Image: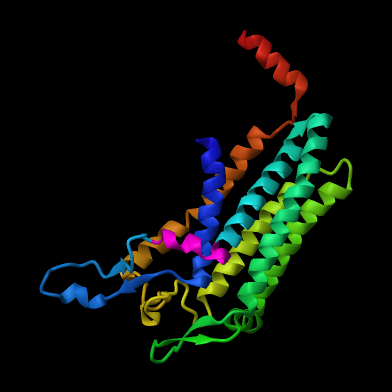
């Protein structure tokens, strides 16, 4: 189950995020709220695949594979940072080069595709959704702060990887690559939704696409979510403290052998 989760988890997650740019087959009918049937279900899939047909789009699979190999890269960098055993570190660095190559091929291919494809633009006055050439490239240009965050994230990931590969004793790459990953994903999500963009497009009915305006929760829900978000810094601090405690010292072969002997 760990292997299945390790493979399918990143691929499916990456494929789901990719649909923010490629779209899915669904319909939204808000008229159901006041229909005589009493049904309050306003959205439904347009076919029996329940969204799994998104995996038939090669670009969704492309980002899914990019996330899969990125997860492997981050795992390898974590091992290098937390294990003190030269033979294993040598194997990790060899695998780091291979997995980085696959990651860059899939990730850069998807980024180029997103930048040159038509995007789903929303008229801020009428709410009408239409296709606009180079919409996501335009979003980056018109939101320079997001572009800076994206570039910092990409540079952070590349620096963490390259420094680990090129410097024999360097083992801090996970910090740069990990933070860079968060920044890169954050920037991509902003580009998919901000600047009058439909963040979850419908390929069946363009006007069913979801935007920040037509899919927001009630004011009460948004206020509750705002208050809850104040807890985020405390959660981050707890995560940092917990992992810092776990990784206070590197794992050595002597420690492993000692624990194995105590077990028996």
The colouring scheme, among rainbow, by chain, secondary structure or one colour, is rainbow
At 57% from the left edge and 66% from the top edge, which residue is drawn? 59
At 33% from the left edge and 73% from the top edge, which residue is drawn? 27
- Name the side, left or right, on which 37 lies relative to 141: left
Confirm whether residue 176 shows in the render: no
Could you tell me residue 155's position as x and y percent? Answer: 76, 63
Q: Nearer the viewer, residue 216 or 135?
A: 135
> What main secondary structure does the magenta stretch of the protein show?
helix
Based on the displayed image, in which of its 4 quarters is residue 205 positioned?
bottom left
Highlighted range, magenta = 51-60
Could you tell me residue 85's position as x and y percent? Answer: 80, 29
Could you tell me residue 237's position as x and y percent? Answer: 58, 47
- Name the side, left or right, on which 130 lies relative to 85: left
Q: Nearer the viewer, residue 252 or 51?
A: 51
Q: Nearer the viewer, residue 44 or 232?
A: 44
Could you tell me residue 180's position as x and y percent? Answer: 69, 58
In the depicted structure, whether residue 8 falls above or below residue 124: above
At 72% from the left edge and 66% from the top edge, which residue is drawn? 152
Q: Which quadrant holds the C terminus?
A: top right
Based on the displayed image, in which of its 4 quarters is residue 43 positioned?
bottom left
Instruction: Tell me if residue 136 is in the magenta stretch.
Output: no
In the depicted structure, whether residue 195 falls above or below residue 88: below
At 47% from the left edge and 73% from the top edge, which residue is drawn? 199
In the depicted structure, whether residue 2 falls above or below residue 228: above
Instruction: Tell me if residue 53 is in the magenta stretch.
Output: yes
Given the current orientation, which residue lies at the most extreme left position?
Answer: 36
């Amino acid at each position: 189950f760990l292997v299945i989760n390790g493979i399918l988890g990143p691929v499916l997650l990456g494929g789901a995020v990719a649909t923010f740019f490629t779209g899915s087959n669904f319909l939204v009918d808000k008229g159901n709220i006041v229909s005589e049937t009493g049904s309050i279900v306003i959205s439904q899939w347009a076919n029996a695949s329940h969204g799994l047909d998104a995996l038939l789009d090669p670009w969704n699979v492309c980002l899914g594979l990019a996330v899969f190999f990125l997860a492997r890269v981050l795992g390898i960098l974590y091992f290098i940072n937390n294990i003190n055993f030269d033979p294993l570190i040598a194997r990790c660095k060899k695998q780091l080069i291979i997995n980085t190559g696959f990651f860059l091929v899939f990730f850069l291919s998807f980024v180029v595709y997103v930048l040159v494809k038509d995007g789903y633009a929303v008229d801020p006055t009428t709410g009408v959704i239409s296709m606009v050439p180079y919409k996501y490239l335009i979003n980056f240009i018109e939101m320079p702060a997001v572009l800076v965050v994206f570039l910092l994230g990409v540079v952070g990931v590349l620096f963490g990887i390259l420094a680990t590969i090129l410097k024999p004793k360097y083992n801090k790459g996970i910090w740069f690559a990990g933070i860079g990953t968060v920044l890169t994903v954050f920037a991509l999500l902003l580009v998919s939704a901000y600047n009058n963009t439909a963040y979850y497009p419908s390929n069946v009915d363009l006007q069913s696409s979801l935007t920040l305006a037509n899919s927001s929760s009630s004011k009460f829900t948004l206020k509750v979510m705002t208050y809850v978000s104040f807890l985020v810094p405390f959660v981050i601090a707890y995560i940092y403290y917990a992992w810092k405690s776990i990784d206070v010292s590197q794992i050595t072969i002597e420690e492993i052998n000692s624990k194995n002997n105590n077990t028996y």
